[in-house]
Image: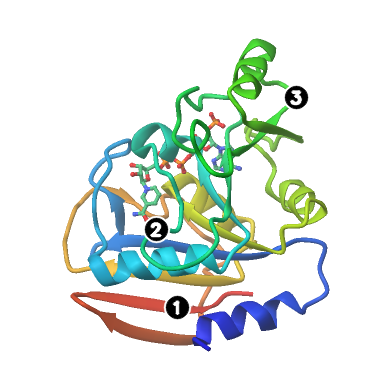
């Protein structure tokens, strides 16, 4: 069993009302997840792409923000290894997810969209009509989906392992809220000077424990525990 898998099962045994959260993304040597906000940027090599698919297969659900859906139109399925597709979840307070997003139309598990009661009713109906499931959650003070109630809602829906894949705002929100249990970052040997993975100051300066570093192809993978 891979160490990360061992950690997932250990962490799952802790008594909490929320799923285990693994934050997994790829960044450049200078800490960027994309060249510019909204501009898809390929970073991972073939080996680390396979790792990402393997990590997806070890989680029951996978979450991204509406910014990533609009920029990348990802599928977030498991294609490069054997395994189950996780349930996609989109954080989307204003329901900006396009109706033809690949996470909904033709997806084996059409997305659950985490939004708030303030979302436009016509937009809600349109997204439900194309197959999305809407989850209504409280707003934080910036009008965005509040994360802890979302995690509790996911636990009630049977999700015990959640992978968070990005983008920058979502990574920042989960780290600021102290809701990341395991972190797995792929570092590609490229410099971008672009959109940083974490844009805001993290005043609690979370530090990884039990740090592991592995070279995969030309990339480095760093993983460890945060909670
Ligand atoms: N390298 C990688 O591994 C990787 C992975 C994923 C994405 N990316 C890149 O990241 C970029 C997108 O990042 P982004 O920062 O623009 O968008 P994002 O983090 O994907 O999505 C942010 C949006 O999610 C919504 N949201 C709702 N509740 C939230 C909450 N509690 N916290 C944060 N966001 C919340 C907000 O929109 P509303 O206010 O409308 O709800 C917010 O604008 C793209 O360029 C993409 O290519 C890279």
- Residue 158 in picture, x, y percent from top left: 77, 57
- Crowding around mark 1 (Cα neighbors within 10 Å: few <14, some 14 to 19, many 20+) is many
Any part of residue 209 in sight: no
Q: Mark 1 or mark 3, which is nearer the start of the sequence?
A: 3
Could you tell whether 97 is left or right of 7 in the image?
A: left
- Residue at x 16% of width, y 62% of height: 190
Distance from the alpha carbon under mark 3 to that under mark 1: 37 Å
Instruction: Give the answer, above or below, for where 5 lies relative to 110.
Output: below
* Residue at image mark 3: 117
* Residue at image mark 1: 223
- Residue at x 18% of width, y 75% of height: 218
Q: Are marks 3 and 1 in contact (CB under 8 Å)?
A: no
* Residue at image mark 2: 79
Q: Are marks 2 and 1 in contact (CB under 8 Å)?
A: no
Q: Mark 1 or mark 2, which is nearer the start of the sequence?
A: 2
Residue 101 circle label: none
- Residue at x 27% of width, y 38% of height: 39
Could you tell whether 53 is left or right of 86 in the image?
A: left
């Amino acid at each position: 069993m891979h160490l990360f898998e061992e950690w997932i099962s250990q962490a799952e045994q802790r008594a909490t009302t929320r799923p285990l959260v693994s934050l997994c993304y790829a960044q450049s040597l200078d800490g960027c997840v994309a060249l510019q906000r909204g501009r898809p940027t390929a970073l991972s090599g073939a080996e680390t792409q396979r790792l990402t698919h393997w990590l997806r297969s070890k989680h029951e659900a996978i979450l991204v923000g509406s910014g990533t859906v609009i920029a990348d139109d990802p599928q977030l399925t498991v294609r490069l290894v054997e395994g189950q597709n996780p349930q996609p979840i989109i954080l989307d307070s204003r329901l900006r997810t396009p109706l033809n997003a690949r996470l909904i139309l033709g997806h084996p598990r059409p997305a659950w969209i985490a939004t708030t009661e303030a979302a436009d009713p016509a937009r809600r109906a349109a997204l439900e009509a194309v197959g999305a499931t809407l989850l209504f959650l409280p707003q934080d003070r910036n009008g965005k989906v509040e994360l802890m109630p979302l995690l509790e809602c996911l636990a009630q829906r049977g999700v015990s392992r959640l992978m968070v894949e990005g983008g920058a705002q979502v990574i920042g929100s989960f780290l600021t809220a102290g809701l990341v249990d395991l972190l797995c970052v792929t570092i590609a040997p490229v410099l971008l000077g672009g959109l940083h993975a974490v844009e805001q100051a993290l005043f609690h300066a979370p530090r990884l424990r039990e740090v592991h570093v592995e070279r995969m192809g030309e990339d480095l993978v760093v993983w460890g525990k945060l909670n």
